[in-house]
Image (cartoon, rainbow, N blue to C red):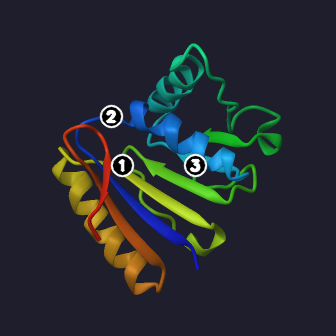
């Protein structure tokens, strides 16, 4: 069974949170696929991951690149798993996959200021729990630190 983690963004946007999440997964030796809602957002996140810190390198590619299968982090807009990732991150309105069991971890990162995102996250929470997966809910405090709420 996959571990499903819900990350409720409030004080920091995806671009500030994603590099840390990816670095932690890579430190555990896990491959990651990040699904975004549009090519425009994929491009913006791709650009950001190359430039977010002067002293850090986060290896990643987009699913459109020929060597995607060999890379530890792949950005995509599709619901596939091009690099046989153990971790799937769903962001920017992407819903958790039906095939949650294909991953060790599935992370749903959603904007707490978006009513539609909150509604979708609640529906996905019910889906994950009814499927028997271990699910946890994390919310940012005012300083950007994560607090486990459920």
Picture quadrant of residue 69: top right
Residue 59's place in the image compared with 133, above or below, is above
Report the mark closest to the observer, 1 or 3. Answer: 1
Residue 119's place in the image compared with 125, above or below, is above
C-alpha distance separating marks 1 and 3: 13 Å
Looking at the image, tell me whether mark 2 or mark 3 is earlier in sequence order: 2
Q: With 104 as the anchor, is 42 left or right in this view?
A: left
Report the mark closest to the observer, 2 or 1. Answer: 2
SS under mark 3: loop
Q: Residue at x 46, y 84 (%)?
A: 131
Q: In the rendered image, which residue does mark 3 sit on? A: 78
Q: Is residue 39 visible?
A: yes
Picture quadrant of residue 76: top right
Residue 13's place in the image compared with 5, above or below, is above
Q: With 74 as the anchor, is 116 left or right in this view?
A: left
Looking at the image, tell me whether mark 1 or mark 3 is earlier in sequence order: 3
C-alpha distance separating marks 2 and 1: 13 Å
SS under mark 1: loop
Position in image of residue 39 (x %, y %): 50, 32
Query: If the image is split into quadrants, where does the C terminus sit?
Result: bottom left
Whether the residues at callouts 2 and 3 have beta carbons within 8 Å, the answer is no
Position in image of residue 84 (x %, y %): 75, 56
Q: Residue at x 66, y 41 (%)?
A: 74
Q: In the rendered image, which residue does mark 1 sit on? A: 93
Whether the residues at callouts 2 and 1 have beta carbons within 8 Å, the answer is no
Number of other residues with Cα within 10 Å of mark 2, as a class: few under 14, some 14 to 19, many 20 or more: some
SS under mark 2: loop
Number of other residues with Cα within 10 Å of mark 1, as a class: few under 14, some 14 to 19, many 20 or more: many
Report the mark closest to the observer, 2 or 3. Answer: 2
Q: With 89 as the anchor, is 150 left or right in this view?
A: left
Q: Residue at x 62, y 67 (%)?
A: 104
């Amino acid at each position: 069974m996959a571990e499903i983690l819900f990350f409720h963004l409030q004080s920091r946007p995806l671009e500030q949170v994603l590099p840390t999440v990816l670095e932690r997964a890579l430190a555990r030796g896990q491959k990651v696929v990040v699904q975004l809602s549009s090519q425009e957002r994929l491009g913006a996140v791709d650009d950001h991951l190359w430039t977010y810190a002067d002293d850090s390198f986060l290896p990643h590619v987009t699913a459109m690149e020929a060597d995607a299968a060999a890379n530890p982090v792949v950005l995509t807009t599709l619901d596939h798993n091009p690099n046989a990732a153990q971790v799937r991150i769903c962001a920017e309105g992407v819903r958790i996959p039906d095939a949650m069991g294909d991953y060790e971890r599935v992370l749903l990162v959603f904007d707490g200021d978006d009513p539609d995102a909150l509604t979708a996250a609640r529906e996905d929470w019910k889906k994950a729990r009814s499927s028997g997966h271990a699910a946890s809910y994390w919310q940012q405090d005012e300083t950007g630190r994560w607090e486990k709420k459920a």
